[in-house]
Image (cartoon, rainbow, N blue to C red):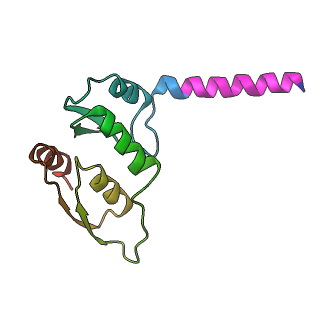
Amino acid sequence: MKNLLKKVYRLNKRAYEEFRSKDLLHPKTGISQRERKRLQSYPAFKEGIANVFGKPFYFTDAVGFLHSLDDIFEDEIYKFTSDKDNPYIIDCGANMGLSILYFKKLYPKSKIICFEPDENTFNILKKNTVEY
């Protein structure tokens, strides 16, 4: 039994190390461990760009970005069920656009109108949603 546990431990450790070495994207958040670590040490309140689902995503603050990313994609705080595959969504206070990205992943055919009152954040929102 002890040898079996050692084998299982070695296999799991090897699988974990392989996962880390490939720096794969997290399936829900679309961000790699390496990118998350980079953003965690990013200067506070400084605009920047993150790699989310293999594409550039602009942000106003790395800490707020990571918090929103986890809330929206990991915890799925905006998840809802629709009878249609193309719901009409209104997002008041869309911030930098993570919610828009989430809604488009959830319902690719959806029609979304979004608002953001802060001019600087709105400009970032436009950059992030130009292809949607």
Provide the major secondary structure of the magenta segment.
helix
Picture coordinates of residue 10 (x, y %)? 71, 22
Number of marks present in the image shown: 0
- Residue 23, percent across and down? 45, 28
Q: Is residue 5 magenta?
A: yes
* Left or right relative to 80: residue 132: left
Look at the image and give the residue range highlighted in magenta. 2-18
- Furthest toward the bottom, the residue is 83
Please tell me which residue lies in front, 48 or 4. 48
Q: Is residue 92 above or below residue 22?
A: below
Q: Residue at x 23, y 54 (%)?
A: 94
- Quarter of the image with the N terminus in it: top right
- Residue 29: x percent and y percent? 41, 43
> x and y percent of residue 8 in the render?
76, 28
Most extreme residue toward the right is 1
Q: In the shown orientation, is residue 112 left or right of residue 54?
A: left
